[in-house]
């Protein structure tokens, strides 16, 4: 998950993994299901895709993540339009949900010991209440 300004995001690092998880995998899975279950030949099928509310418009600090969700939504809307006579496609766009998802997540920090040797430490972090209060929450 990417949470940084678009021009400060390491696109080379963030884009491939997010595109693979958020776009490529659902597309390939749906194609395999359609082919292996003979949906096209039977002229009947229904796909439910979970995208994100971030697929609807601009999403500050989440440009890469949001773009992968835009791609997912666009692909499945196009697929549904192309095969509308036999394939139903529903794209669900859930928003943020008030959970403890980020509570206790680990972050790595680097520090030096007394001898000047670099040491990596993991620490538990929480999302600040100020940050959480600005997030759209669906209850």
Image: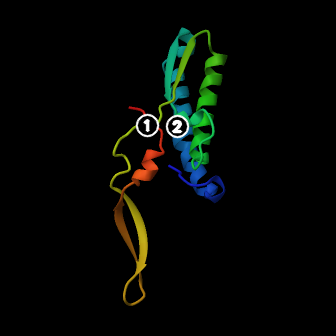
Q: Is residue 130 left or right of residue 42?
A: left
Q: Between 13 and 32, which is closer to the camera in this rendering?
A: 13
How are the colours assigned in the image? rainbow
Spatial separation of the CA atoms under disc 2 and disc 1: 27 Å
Give residue 124's mark: none
The total of numbered circles placed on residues is: 2
* Residue contact at pointers 2 and 1, CB within 8 angstroms: no
Q: Nearer the viewer, mark 2 or mark 1?
A: 1
Give residue 137's mark: 1
Q: Between 13 and 86, which is closer to the camera in this rendering?
A: 13
Q: Residue 91: x percent and y percent?
A: 53, 25
Who's the residue at 55% across and 46% down the image? Answer: 18
Asked if 118 appears above or below 122 in the picture, the reply is below
Who's the residue at 66% across and 17% down the image? Answer: 82
Q: Residue 80: x percent and y percent?
A: 61, 19
Asked where in the image residue 106 lies, by quadrant, the reply is bottom left
Q: Which residue has dot 2 on it? A: 25
Is label 1 in a helix, a strand or a loop? Answer: loop
> Which quadrant of the figure contains the C terminus?
top left
Q: Is residue 7 left or right of residue 96?
A: right
Asked if 120 appears above or below 89 in the picture, the reply is below
């Amino acid at each position: 998950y990417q949470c940084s300004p678009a021009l400060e995001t390491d696109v080379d690092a963030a884009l491939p993994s997010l595109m693979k998880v958020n776009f490529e995998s659902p597309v390939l899975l749906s194609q395999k299901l359609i082919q292996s279950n003979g949906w096209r030949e039977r002229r009947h099928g229904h796909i439910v895709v979970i995208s994100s509310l971030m697929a609807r418009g601009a999403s500050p600090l989440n440009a890469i993540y949001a773009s992968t969700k835009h791609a997912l939504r666009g692909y499945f809307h196009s697929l549904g339009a192309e095969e509308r006579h036999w394939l139903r496609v529903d794209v669900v766009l859930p928003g943020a949900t008030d959970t403890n998802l980020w509570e206790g997540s680990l972050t790595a920090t680097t520090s030096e010991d007394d001898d000047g040797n670099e040491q990596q430490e993991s620490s538990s972090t929480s999302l600040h209440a100020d940050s959480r209060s600005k997030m759209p929450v669906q209850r």
